[in-house]
Image (cartoon, rainbow, N blue to C red):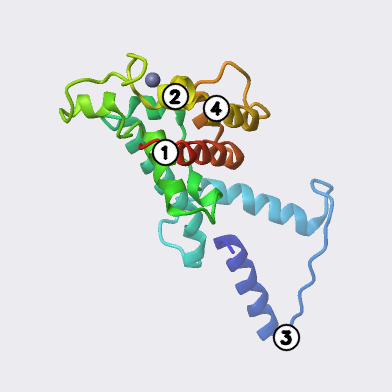
Amino acid sequence: MGFIETEILNAVNALKLAGTSTTFIWIRGHFNIYGNTIADTLAKQAILLPRRELCEFPASDLNRWFKVQQMKGWDNFHSNYHAGFKYKIMFPQPSSNPWFARMPSHPKTFYRIMSRLRSGHCATKTYLLRIGRVESGMCNVCLEDEDAEHMILVCPIHRNKRRLLFEKIEEFIPRPFNLELILVTELEAVYDAVVTFIVDSEIKL
Ligand SMILES: [Zn+2]
C-alpha cells in the first residue's frame, strides 16, 4: 500500500469515527460534478506544493525500490568488471534468477562442469599452459589446441559419444555447433546433454 492509499484510509477512518460512512463509486471525470471539480482543483494545487520529504508509508513499499537498486548495482559491477569479457559477451544481462536456480535437482558435477565451461576456467591444456602448469597446450591426439571446444566438439577421440550429444542438441541449436552457441541457450536439456557427454567420455575439465 502506498502513501496515498494510506492517506485515503486514514481519512475514511476519521470519517467513520465521526459517524459518517464512506462509499467509493466511479464517476466520469470533468463532467461538472461538484465534488469531482473540487477534487480536481485540489489535485492541481497539490502538484504545485513543495515536495514532502517525510511521509509515512509501509516499509514494504521500499522492497521494489531496493530490488531495482540492487539489480542496477549488480549490473554496473558486472559491466565494469575488469575481466571476463567473453562471459559478458555471452551473458550481457545479469539475471536475478541465476541459471543454476532454473535447473534444480542435478548432481554437483553438473553445476561444477557447467560453471567451468561458462566461465572458461576448465582444466584443459590451453588453460593449464596459460597459468604455467604445463609446457604445451596441444591435444595429445591431434596436435590442435586442447581447449573445451576442442574436447567437446572436435577431438576425434570422443567421436562416438559425440554423435549422441549432437543428436540431443540439434533440436535446439542450428549447425554448425560451437561452444558459445551451446552455452548461451541456458537450456536444461542442452546443458544436460553436454554434461552427460563429458562424464561418459571421461573428459576432465
Ligand atoms: Zn584432439
Instruction: Please state which amino acid type lies under the numbered disc 4.
Output: Asn
Q: Rounded to the nearest whole Å, what is the CA distance between mark 3 and mark 4?
A: 84 Å
Residue located 46% across and 19% down the image: 154
Q: Nearer the viewer, residue 34 or 21?
A: 21
Instruction: Please state which amino acid type lies under the numbered disc 2.
Output: Ile
Say which label, 3 or 4, has the lower sequence index: 3
Q: Rounded to the nearest whole Å, what is the CA distance between mark 4 and mark 2?
A: 8 Å
Say which label, 3 or 1, has the lower sequence index: 3
- The residue pinned by badge 4 equals 160
Residue located 84% across and 50% down the image: 28
Instruction: Please state which amino acid type lies under the numbered disc 3.
Output: Gly
The answer to whether residue 65 shows anywhere in this view is yes
Query: What is the secondary structure assignment of the residue under circle 1?
Result: loop
Q: Quadrant of the C terminus?
A: top left
Q: Is residue 95 left or right of residue 174?
A: left
Query: Disc 3 vs disc 1: which is toward the camera?
Result: 1
Q: Is residue 1 left or right of residue 30?
A: left
Say which label, 1 or 4, has the lower sequence index: 4
Q: Rounded to the nearest whole Å, what is the CA distance between mark 2 and mark 1?
A: 11 Å
Q: Position of residue 54 (x, y in %)?
A: 41, 61
The circle drawn on residue 202 is: 1
Say which label, 2 or 1, has the lower sequence index: 2
The circle drawn on residue 19 is: 3
Q: Nearer the viewer, residue 89 or 192?
A: 192
